[in-house]
Amino acid sequence: MAVPKSKVSPSRRGMRRAHDSLNKPAMAIEQTTGEVHLRHHISPNGVYRGRKVLNTKFDE
């Protein structure tokens, strides 16, 4: 079983965890409609990179 040789101080523990925080997901603005969506994903109205790729309920 792994047992630490000495106690890790709160400062050292905090330095190790400095990069563990979550970042906000990268968002993109659709060039034709101006909608905000996740990068590399279809926008809510079915547009991807300026082209209509999916018919959605917004079309009706």
Image (cartoon, helix red, strand yellow):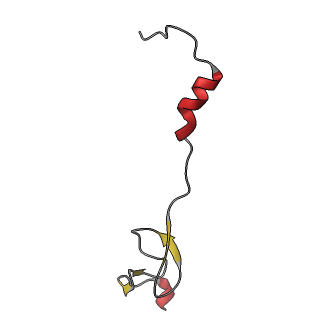
Residue placed farthest to the bottom in the image?
60
| Image height of 3 relative to 12, above or below | above
> How many labels, in total?
0
Residue placed farthest to the right in the image?
10
In the image, what residue occupies the spot 42% across and 74% down?
42
Q: Which of 30 and 56 is in front in this view?
A: 30
Image coordinates of residue 10 in percent, x first then y, are 64, 23
Q: In this view, does 34 lie to the left or right of 47?
A: right
Q: Is residue 14 left or right of residue 47?
A: right
Answer with the quarter of the image where residue 6 lies. Answer: top right
| Image height of 48 relative to 5, above or below | below
In the image, what residue occupies the spot 42% across and 81% down?
46
| Image height of 20 relative to 31, above or below | above
Image coordinates of residue 30 in percent, x first then y, are 47, 80
| Image height of 25 relative to 27, above or below | above
Image coordinates of residue 33 in percent, x first then y, are 50, 87
In the image, what residue occupies the spot 53% across and 40% down?
19
In the image, what residue occupies the spot 35% across and 82% down?
53
Q: In this view, does 36 lie to the left or right of 54?
A: right
Q: Nearer the viewer, residue 16 or 28?
A: 16
Give the quarter of the figure containing the N terminus. Answer: top left
Image coordinates of residue 9 in percent, x first then y, are 62, 18
